[in-house]
Amino acid sequence: MIYWKLFLAFFVPNIVGYGGGPAIIPLIEAEVVGRYGWMNAREFAETLALGNALPSPIATKMAGYVGYDVAGVGGALVAVLATVAPSLLLMLGALGLLQRHSDSPRVKRMSQWVRPVITVMMAWLTWSFFSEGLTSAGLLHTLLIGTGAAVALLRFRTHPAIVILAALVYGGIFLG
């Protein structure tokens, strides 16, 4: 029964919540603290603060931690599954629909319009990262890290995880 409660506590907020992890955190808190009483508000806030300090989506980290705290490894697996299941189901449905109508001229036109939109979004993301780097680290460090990363990725074909780790080390030494 605890696994079913964990599943519902994370599935429902993720199916009705709109706006990603930060938008569904209050819904998760209502379930975890309000409905089931697995944590008090202070414990939830501390868990949220710890989760925000770690990489990856906040909702899955919260689900894994709460699930483990409530029912061990099985609870963590159930809670994480309940968190990703709504997105997975919607994505599979959308892919099935697109596949079924792949010969449609409308779908082909839609696909042609998606690429430029994604390109603009990636350019905007790059610009916002660059602007944030300038603000927090300064021009010299931003250019050194950016140039070093570009050379490592393009010239030496270094794995992106190693480039990210090197940038973290550089930041820890020179910006910490």
Image (cartoon, helix red, strand yellow):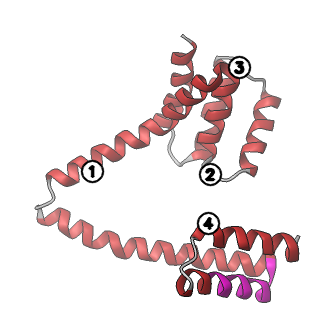
Q: Which residue is mark 1?
A: 95
N-terminal of the two: label 2 or label 4? 2
Of badges 2 and 4, nearer the viewer stands 4
Q: Are marks 3 and 1 in contact (CB under 8 Å)?
A: no
Residue drawn at the location 65% of the way across and 37% of the way down: 62
Does residue 6 lie above or below 172 as drawn? above
What percent of the width, then of the height, locates residue 165?
70, 67
Label 2 vs 3, first from the N-terminus: 3
Q: Is residue 66 visible?
A: yes
Which residue is labeled 2 in the image?
A: 56
Whether residue 23 is in magenta: the answer is: no
The residue singled out by tag 3 in the image is 38
Left or right: residue 176 compared with residue 135: right
Magenta range? 137-149
Residue 77 position in % (x across, y down): 55, 30
Query: What amino acid type is highlighted by mark number 2?
Result: Ser
Q: Between marks 2 and 4, how big is the CA–CA gap?
A: 14 Å
Which three-letter amino acid code belongs to the residue tagged 1?
Answer: Leu
Mark 2 or 3: in front is: 2
For the residues labelled 2 and 4, say whether their Cβ atoms are less than 8 Å apart: no
Distance from Cα at disc 4 to Cα at disc 3: 36 Å
| Relative to 102, residue 57 above or below | above
Q: Quadrant of the N terminus?
A: top right
Look at the picture and state if 83 lies above or below 134.
Answer: above
Helix, strand or loop status at disc 1 = helix
Mark 3: secondary structure: loop
Q: Quadrant location of the C terminus?
A: bottom right
Identify the residue position indicated by label 4 in the image.
Answer: 161
